[in-house]
Amino acid sequence: MNEPSFQPTIPLSLPPFGQSMTFRLSPGRNPKLALERLSLGFDHTEGVIGIGAPFARAFPGTIPGLRTFPSLSGVNCTVPATQKDLWVFLRGNDRGEIFDRSRILRSFLEKDFALEDAMDTFFYHGRDLSGYEDGTENPKGDEIAKVAFVPPGNPLAGSSFVAVQRWIHDLKWFQSHPRHEQDNIIGRKQKTNEELDQAPDSAHVKRTAQESFNPPAFMLRRSMPWATVDEQGLEFIVYGHSLDPFERVLRRMVGEEDGIPDALFSFSRPVTGGYYWCPPVKNGKIDLTALGFA
C-alpha cells in the first residue's frame, strides 16, 4: 500500500495572493465530527490546512513533535504565543479567487469553528516589504521534500510541520536610515542580495544562517507580505519535517545563546505565533489516521 503524500500546495512557489486564517473549536462542538467535516470539505489543491496541538489532544492518536508555540523574550524583544486550534492558508491568482475560496471555506467551517483571525497576503516582487529578498536559502528541487516533509517509512510520512507568525514592520523607521545601515540590519546588500563580509553579529542573516546550527536548521520558507491601511509586515510561514529547526533559530534570534538579539527586532516585531501539523493526503483527502481515525 502506498504511503500518503504531502499536501500538494506546500512546495509550490508563492501565489500572487493568499489568505492566512486561524480558528478555534466552538464550545460544545464534537471534535471528531468537526474534523471529519473539515476533511471532506477542504480542497487541498487550493491551500494548506494545519492542526494545532490543543485541537489534536482531543483525539486518541498522538502526533510526535507537535507542541504549542513558545513565548520567548530577550533584550528589548518579545515573541508572543497565540496558539490556535486550526490554521488554513488559501492561495489564489487574484483577490476575487481568494474571496470566493474564503467564503466557501468559512461557510462549512462555521458549524464547528470560530474564526479568530484572517489576513490577506500578496506577492511583492519576491521580496519582503523592506525591499530585501525573502527565502534566499530555500531548498531547491528534490531537497524540498527532504526538508519540508516527514520521510517515507515514518508513521507520519507525508506530514509537515509549520510555524506561522505575523510580523509588523516599522518601515518608516527602517527607511529613515541610510542604505548601508539597513544592509547591516539584514546582513545583505539590498541591491545585489550578496551577504556582507563584515556584517555585525546582530545581523539577521548571521543570526539565522541555517548551516551554523548543529544539526543544520534547514526549512522551507513560504512567507508573504501583508498590508492594511495603518500597518504592514510579513506573514512568516515556514515548513519542516520537524519544528525543531525553526525553534532553534527563533531562540537564537532572541539571544538565548549569547545575549545578542537579532537586529530584525529593531524595526519589526511578531504579534502572533502558532505551531501546526499539516496532515498528509491519501485517496484525495486529508489523512487523519495518525489522530486515531480509521
Image (spheres, grey):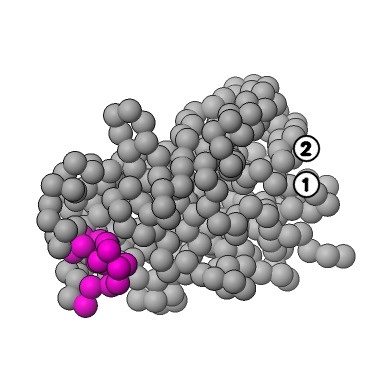
Q: Is residue 275 left or right of residue 6?
A: left
In 3D space, how far apart are the residues under numbered discs 1 and 2 (Cα atoms)? 7 Å
Indicate the amino acid at tag 2.
Leu
Along the viewing direction, whichever of 255 and 95 lies nearer the viewer: 95
Residue 285 is tagged as 1
Asked if the magenta segment contains residue 75, the reply would be: no
**How many residues crowd around disc 1 within 10 Å: few (fewer than 14), some, or many (20 or more)?**
some
Name the residue at 25% across, 66% down. Answer: 189
Is residue 34 in sight in this rendering? Answer: yes
State yes or no: residue 195 in magenta. Answer: yes
| Quadrant in which the N terminus is drawn | bottom right
Q: Position of residue 183 (x, y in %)?
A: 21, 62
Residue at horizontal 45%, vertical 51%? 223
Does residue 263 appear left or right of residue 109 in this picture? left
- Percent x, y of residue 76: 17, 49
In the image, the segment drawn in magenta is 183-197
Identify the mark nearer the N-term, 1 or 2: 2
* SS category of the residue bearing label 1: strand
Asked if 29 appears above or below 7 in the picture, the reply is above
**Which corner quadrant of the image does residue 198 belong to?**
bottom left
For mark 2, give the secondary structure. helix
Residue 31: x and y, percent? 68, 33
At horizontal 28% and vertical 50% (from top left) the residue drawn is 130
Which residue is tagged 2?
40
The answer to which of 93 and 230 lies nearer the viewer is 93
Contact check, label 1 and label 2, Cβ < 8 Å: yes
Q: Is residue 85 visible?
A: no
Q: Which residue is drawn at 32% across and 67% down?
A: 193
Prevailing secondary structure class for the magenta stretch in the rendered image: loop
